[in-house]
Image (cartoon, rainbow, N blue to C red):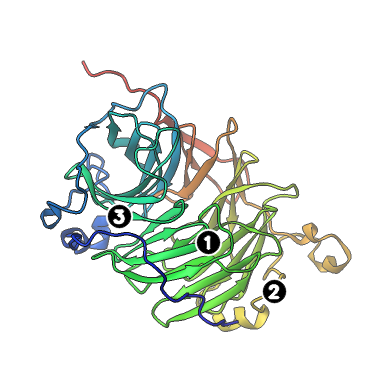
Amino acid sequence: MDTPSPFSPPFPLPNTSSKFQSLNLQRYLEQPEAQQHQLQPQQAAVEQVNDDSLHGSSIKNPESGVGSNHVFVNHSATAYHVTFNQDYGCFAIGTDRGFGVYNCVPFGESFCRNFENIGGIGIIEMLFRSNILAFVGHGDHPQYPRNKVMIWDDQQSRCIHELCFRSEVRRIRLRKDCLVVVLEHKIFVYNFSNLELLFQIETTTNPKGLCEVSQTADQLVLVCPGLQKGQVWVKHNASKSTKSIVAHDSVLACFALTREGNLLATASTKGTLIRIFNTLEGTLLQEVRRGLDRAEIYSLSFSPTAQWLAVSSDKGTVHVFSLKVNLGNRSTDKSNCSSNSRVPVAASSSFSFIRGALPKYFSSEWSVAQFRLPGVSQYIVTFGNENNTLIILGWDGSFFRCKFDPASGKEMTQLEYHNFLEPEEPCN
């Protein structure tokens, strides 16, 4: 149902610089979308953007001790954060030495930056494939305070702006038009061109910094926890409306949004069921089962066409589910389930005809493909640019590219493996 707006009235704003000038990203933003999302085999993962307007910006002490490629990538590097960019064509890592950016297909390092004072970078977020990144310090020797968001221009090799908050930053989300900063109980949304605060949202306790935003050129769709356990808020900025979804009875653990912002996948701390919702109406479209035992869900990811959903967890297995949502027939979806429904649209089990007499898992929809991961690292997952392929990243430096056959239901086939934390062979 629709709820009163959760956006609180302004209170003393986070500290920002009065000297900040507009980010000059126009050259990048005007590129055809196909060019933004496809890299040629020898093309760098990051495209440089001129930011002459930011020279002499708000940071009084530009970074002077920044090393170039291959400096921090050695046997002692520890990954604090790993994340894909908005088109999932490359990824960024924050380590105890600095940060780096890598291309997914073909796999390869774009650049790595080492801070000479061995300062750690935790949360990190790319702006598509531009030279602009945002990050937060982390570790025993953080490069920056954990309550500051630093905006980095890699063309200038320095931070060009900072946002200071009263508590630790939990997550950052970037769009071409806005910057989202997530604290444990509040979310701030800024206009990215001038860092003017657009609005803020109060949430329930959110230690994981759960928040997702749509990435198409249309208006912003933002998803975050509500004020109640298991509740999700979906803000449609174009209509100035907020949809409240009671997604789970337990605390939210993870959720994912399609690029267009029309579908939402959610998981709770139980980690057994994943639910898919229509964000416009808040209706439950489908429910799938990861397993019977509790699990911590690390990541959820839709395929570009929303035909598949990938799930990674602490059980060491990545699952792929077939989605049966019909975006073209929302009236049918709406009539079949309400916003608080707990009944999946379709059941794949042959026991569904006696659903009411047997435990619920007999009528559950199970994954069509799995991939078993080694070790106990945390992994995130997304879909590759080739049909039926997955890319899996681990905090231990693992990079897997796999292929699945949904018709066979068998284990996925590993296509390649790399470790982005291991030292590369020295140049001759």
| Tag 2 near tag 3, CB within 8 Å | no
Crowding at mark 1 (Cα within 10 Å: few <14, some 14-19, many 20+):
some
Label 2, on which residue? 341
The tag earlier along the polypeptide, 1 or 2, is: 1
In the rendered structure, find residue 185 and report the number of the disc placed on it: 1
Q: Which residue is drawn at 36% across and 22% down?
A: 423
Q: Dot 2: what SS?
A: loop
Whether residue 348 sits left or right of residue 114 in the image: it is right
Q: Dot 1: what SS?
A: loop
Q: Which residue is drawn at 34% across and 35% down?
A: 98
Closest to the observer, 417 or 253 = 253
Q: Position of residue 281 (x, y in %)?
A: 55, 79
Q: Where is residue 238 in the image (x, y as percent from the top left)?
A: 39, 80
Whether residue 126 sits left or right of residue 261 in the image: it is left
In the rendered structure, find residue 37 and report the number of the disc placed on it: 3
Whether residue 198 sits left or right of residue 183 in the image: it is left
In the rendered structure, find residue 79 and report the number of the disc placed on it: none
